[in-house]
Amino acid sequence: MSHRVGSDLGAQETGITNTASLPEHSEAPYIHKVGVPPKQNLLQEFTATVKETFFADDPLRQFKDQPRSRKFIIGIQSVFPILEWGRHYNLTKFKGDLIAGLTIASLCIPQDIGYSNLANLAPQYGLYSSFVPPLIYAFMGSSRDIAIGPVAVVSLLLGTLLKDEIDPDKYPHDYIRLAFTATFFAGITQVMLGFFRLGFLIDFLSHAAVVGFMAGAAITIALQQLKGLLGIKKFTKKTDIVSVMRSVWSVVDHGWNWQTIVIGVTFLAFLLLAKYIGKKNRKLFWVPAIAPLISVILSTFFVRITHAEKHHVAIVGKFKKGVNPSSVKEIFFTGTYLAKGFKIGVVAAMIALTEAIAIGRTFATMKDYQIDGNKEMIALGAMNVVGSMTSCYVATGSFSRSAVNYMAGCHTAVSNIVMSCVVLLTLEIITPLFEYTPNAILASIIISAVVGLIDIEAVILIWKIDKFDFVACMGAFFGVVFVSVEIGLLIAVSISFAKILLQVTRPRTAILGKLPRTTVYRNILQYPEATKVPGVLIVRVDSAIYFSNSNYIRERILRWLGDEEEYMKENHQPRIQYLIVEMSPVTDIDTSGIHALEELHKSLQKRDIQLLLANPGPAVIDKLHASKFTDLIGEDNIFLTVSDAVVTCAPKVEQA
């Protein structure tokens, strides 16, 4: 066997082989044999599989050929990347990080107060979650641009799931304890996923499903803010659009407060205008960044001097001043709420990870640097574990803040440290000033923030590219909007898995024909000019052959064959004598797949048709040899290319 399969893959793709220079009907064309890879023992095979699955990025390569002292330093730096990039930190970078940190702080403070309301928590918990977690992430995270803190979708999800277990109005202390418990297990889940290098699990939630889920969550969050925007006191606890709109319109003549509406709508228009200005002119990114804080200051001042609270304008009121208190003893480590906190934490962890990793990768690509997804998970998990013990709830990467952080010129994660310091000063000094902040302003800030989660362009692109993806997108969207956040999430995951199962169990197959003046064989539907070889049917299987699809593939090939034989008979053409299965896309095969090939071979023998295989990969040919299938069909009936197979069998067809 003169050449390995792998060495000729490039030639196969371009249709160029060592026989290309020879006429197809030359008397003695040289035919390459398919190479069999060296036999690996069980340990070698298992080690290679584990390495490729969990350690494809070879994380230990930086330790190779290093002295023990250097390995220790590299190990510490891998856990705390700040020790590596901190050595090259300078005043120029600090100036950029300082401006970025102050800018995102002006955005995060009013957002945090509003997001804590989404989670049914007191305002200080939102600020707590923008103090400790960003500090932890700054030391352990590998992204330079991501800004850490509470986010709207996770806050809503957490608030909805927690409220299903405990009524926050009747049992506020148990509710906050369950929130800390869920945060703790969210962090543990994220750390475990990173430590055991299971980050690929979050990829099972497709991009289309995430787009639909985020858009649905944005609509739901905006609808929830109608309570604060319209000054409604009695409001439904359900999140679906029907219940919310019924709750809104049932009190239209006596439950709305016109002063609240004026404040809310005026500042909402101001915030949307600021966002539009920032979008039109990237140099004015700071306008939408500071607009929320300006809105809070102006509205608070207006309410304070007019005593609008006496006219039923709802205000934030007093909330606890000071730095994060310890909450270690508040976490449920025993009892019935332990399992509930674990369940909620796992769900929140996955959504938080999906958002954070997507944001981190996006900005890393824009700045052309690499982030380690598994290290990111460990960093995010560690900050949530510590956060759960310091009165924080689930924090993750915020897209709006990260975008502002990026445009403000941040260089490193020091911008998160600057933001944390500003939040600390706010907690220690400024919190009393928020007492007269109207709830309508917080509602306006949240509505303007979640508008960006509705990506119409992405939905249109999904529709153009893949209709099944569009179904997943819309399924997640309508599930969130018309039922609940958790149902929408369940639909998103279910449709994503359904798509995977459909693609695995029903892979594509194609009939191939020869392109004129070449030795290349391609799908006749894609290339109508491709011609079939008389007496030969060439079929390509575009998938690995497993137990889940082996019977389908066998039956589909036989249906192709039946249709072709019927066509030949009707048109008085020579019957099919050879069936060539192009196996280049077949990356693997299991025992069920080999059994299906054996059954196919038996069916073909009854019809006096010879089975030929073209270009089986190393994993496939190794298993075909191990199962003795190569002996069954004959070594001479396995070829490196379709062209080789046709060159061999075409003269025999002509003689017949």
Image (cartoon, rainbow, N blue to C red):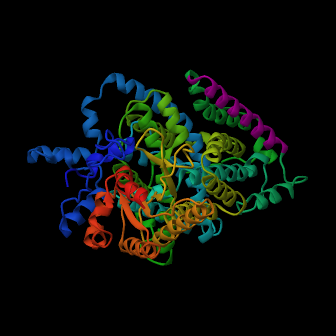
Instruction: Identify whether 197 is placed above or below 528.
Output: below
Question: Magenta span covers which residues?
Answer: 258-282
State the quadrant of the N terminus: bottom left
**Nearer-the-camera pick, 579 or 340:** 579
Residue depicted at x 40% and y 38%: 417
State the quadrant of the C terminus: bottom left
Residue lying farthest to the front in this orientation: 655
The location of residue 273, given as percent across then percent down, is: 70, 29
The location of residue 406, given as percent across then percent down, is: 47, 31
Residue lying farthest to the right in this orientation: 253
Instruction: Identify whether 273 is placed above or below 495.
Output: above
- Do we see residue 466 in this rendering? yes
639 lies left or right of 72? right
- Do we see residue 129 in this rendering? no
Residue depicted at x 52% and y 33%: 404
The location of residue 460, given as percent across then percent down, is: 66, 43
**Nearer-the-camera pick, 256 or 472:** 472
135 lies left or right of 128? left
